[in-house]
Amino acid sequence: MDLKESINVNNIPAHVAIIMDGNGRWAKQHGEDRIFGHHEGVNSVREIVEACGEIGVKYLTLYAFSTENWNRPKDEVDALMELLVSTISLETPNLHKKGVKLAVIGDIHSLPPTCQKELQESIDLTAGNSKVTLILALSYSSKWEITEAVKKIGRDVEEGKIKSSAINSRLIQENLNTKKFPDPELMIRTSGEHRISNFLLWQLAYAEFYFTDVLWPDFRKDEFFKAIISYQNRERRFGKTSEQLRSN
């Protein structure tokens, strides 16, 4: 049976976040260097974006490069930056054609100027699209994001723009990189690791987690649909009891 046909179209998560893990291990299994795995991982990105459009997922956040990734060997980081630039340049026309809007979260100013330029051009070109919003987390970490939000709020307090008594969870949320997007309802991590690696710590507070042993380059539409079906088979209570949910 086609997995997509098993999906309940009335219970689709509006926002899915993915930690794309396992490119290096996949490459090693195939006797290639790590960069080959990253290149192959781009094909999975393409398929998952298409899958989101097919079933109605409106937001997709991909953890593409963390602040900690800057500590990897320089040749790998340089190759990743080159891959990022070339991929954005090549994929943007197709994304635009399919109604995908590109957005970015993270410390973008730390990226090479060529990356910043390509990203901004793609963001500008796709700004009017609305079928799927593809959010790339680049030079991103959640601790960095929350720290920056606290600094911004602190400055506003010092300058008398707000009172400290006005600080609440809503104000913090409004100062995060993700303020324009709903929180993810489903977080997927590939490659068998069971941690969230400094990714969307605030935003994932009530998300469902789905971990799979499949390495990212092998994570294609059917694997994504399995994650969606798993999500649909769970009971999301948000602190309530099962009985309360059924009575509503």
Image: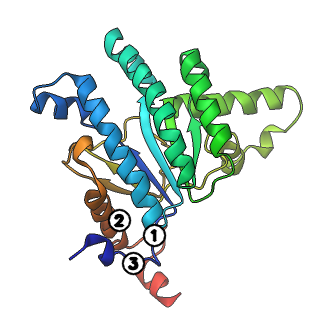
The residue shown at (54%, 28%) is 144
- How many marks the image carries: the answer is 3
Q: Which residue is mark 3?
A: 8
Kind of residue at disc 2: Ile
Residue 20 appears anywhere in the view: no
Label 2 packing within 10 angstroms: few (<14), some (14-19), many (20+)? many
Q: Are marks 3 and 2 in contact (CB under 8 Å)?
A: no
Circle 1 — which element?
Answer: loop
Cα–Cα gap, marks 3 and 2: 9 Å
Q: Are marks 1 and 2 in contact (CB under 8 Å)?
A: yes
Q: Are marks 3 and 1 in contact (CB under 8 Å)?
A: yes
Looking at the picture, how far across and down is residue 174, in whole percent? 70, 45
Circle 3 — which element?
Answer: loop
Cα–Cα gap, marks 1 and 2: 7 Å
Q: Is residue 6 left or right of residue 248?
A: left
Label 1 packing within 10 angstroms: few (<14), some (14-19), many (20+)? many
Kind of residue at disc 1: Ile
Q: Which residue is mark 2?
A: 228
Specify the quadrant that holds the N terminus. bottom left
The residue shown at (39%, 59%) is 51
Looking at the picture, how far across and down is residue 47, in whole percent? 36, 52
Kind of residue at disc 3: Asn
Q: Which residue is mark 1?
A: 12
Q: Is residue 211 left or right of residue 141?
A: left
